[in-house]
């Protein structure tokens, strides 16, 4: 007697094997410290791979700000590259603000704290390449500062108010003494303090980079013509009063009115809004 065979159950497909990177665990969650180890480089683009490996260790939390990389000879041996290739990669990471290279007996390659000023260079490069225009930069600044004012109204604390008040005092002194260029530097600091009062580092970083370039236009205008915004100190005090009161509508209105008046002043002098001015090196110090 023949028997019917039961239908065959189709086999389930095996899940794809995880590669080594997918299996990596976040060592920041581990209780015990994990020894720092680098896999050898097996690629023609050793320079990029070295940078990528170090960044991976940062992402995993194995490396943290202040940590020192292994000695150059040991690190080159772990990665399987020449010391010249390793030095090139380390110099690149230094330029990117990831590493600090220190010479001497206690020297070496150290992981840096984050440097938000690096975004300024990116913004300048985008202007140089024509990716963004001066007009777009100015427009973005007005809209971003709308957000900054709203967040500062919600998050600013007493130390923020005190820092802004001290800045206004320095601005008043510079105005009284006719030091217009120092007054521009006070304005640069004012926006930095205001951005810090948002308690949002990403927004502060954007504001710093946009303000850094925009203040070059204001500085060039003041340096070439001796013209400065009238009643600046009075407007600053009105704004700070609205900020202290958490009056979002008043603070936003005052800030936007000021920024638009500055923009109109600059547009009266096409030379002051040129790309050459935006890319010029202007780093005067504030005399107090």
Image (cartoon, rainbow, N blue to C red):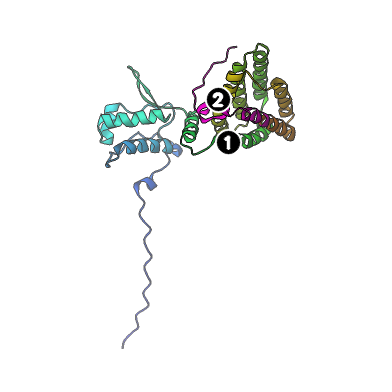
**Image check: 70 left or right of 203?**
left
In terms of depth relative to the viewer, which is nearer, 287 or 46? 287
At mark 1, the secondary structure is helix
Q: Residue at x 28, y 35 (%)?
A: 79
In terms of depth relative to the viewer, which is nearer, 20 or 125? 125
Q: Which residue is tagged 1? A: 135
Residues in magenta? 260-288
In terms of depth relative to the viewer, which is nearer, 132 or 264? 264
The CA distance from mark 1 to mark 2 is 14 Å
> Is 179 situated above or below 120?
above
Number of labelled discs? 2
**Image check: 60 left or right of 171?**
left
Looking at the picture, how far across and down is residue 38, in whole percent? 32, 36
Assess disc 1: are there few (<14), some (14-19) or many (≥20) residues with their C-alpha within 10 Å of its C-alpha: few
Q: Residue at x 63, y 37 (%)?
A: 143
Q: Residue furthest bottom?
A: 1
Q: Earlier in the sequence, mark 1 or mark 2?
A: 1
Assess disc 2: are there few (<14), some (14-19) or many (≥20) residues with their C-alpha within 10 Å of its C-alpha: many
Which quadrant: the C terminus? top right
Looking at the picture, how far across and down is residue 55, in whole percent? 39, 36
At mark 2, the secondary structure is helix
Looking at the picture, how far across and down is residue 183, in whole percent? 62, 18
Q: Quadrant of residue 236?
A: top right
Looking at the picture, how far across and down is residue 179, in whole percent? 62, 13
Which quadrant: the N terminus? bottom left
Q: Quadrant of residue 88?
A: top left
In terms of depth relative to the viewer, which is nearer, 65 or 214? 214
Q: Which residue is tagged 2? A: 216
**Image check: 23 left or right of 273?**
left
Q: Residue at x 42, y 31 (%)?
A: 96
* Magenta segment includes 247: no
């Amino acid at each position: 007697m023949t028997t019917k065979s039961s239908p065959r159950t189709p086999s389930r497909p095996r899940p794809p094997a995880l590669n080594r990177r997918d299996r990596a665990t976040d060592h920041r969650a581990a209780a015990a410290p994990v020894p720092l180890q680098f896999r050898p480089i097996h690629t023609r683009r050793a320079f990029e791979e070295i940078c990528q490996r170090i960044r991976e260790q940062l992402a995993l939390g194995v490396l943290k700000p202040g940590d020192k990389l292994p000695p150059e000879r040991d690190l080159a041996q772990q990665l399987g590259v020449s010391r010249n290739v390793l030095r090139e990669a380390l110099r690149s990471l230094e330029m990117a603000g990831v590493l600090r290279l220190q010479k001497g007996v206690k020297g070496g390659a150290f992981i840096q704290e984050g440097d938000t000023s690096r975004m300024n260079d990116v913004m300048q490069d985008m202007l140089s390449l024509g990716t963004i225009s001066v007009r777009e930069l100015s427009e973005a600044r007005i809209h971003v500062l709308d957000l900054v004012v709203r967040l500062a109204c919600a998050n600013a604390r007493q130390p923020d108010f005190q820092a802004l008040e001290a800045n206004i005092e320095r601005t008043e002194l510079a105005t009284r003494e006719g030091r217009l260029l120092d007054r521009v530097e006070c304005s640069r600091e004012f926006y930095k303090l205001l951005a810090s009062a948002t308690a949002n580092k990403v927004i502060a970083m954007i504001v710093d980079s946009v303000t850094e370039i925009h203040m070059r236009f204001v500085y060039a205008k003041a340096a070439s013509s001796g013209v400065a915004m009238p009643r600046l100190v009075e407007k600053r005090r009105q704004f700070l009063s609205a900020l202290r009161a958490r009056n979002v509508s008043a603070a936003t209105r005052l800030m936007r009115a000021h920024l638009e008046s500055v923009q109109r002043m600059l547009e009266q002098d096409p030379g002051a809004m040129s790309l050459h001015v935006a890319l010029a090196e202007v780093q005067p110090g504030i005399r107090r």
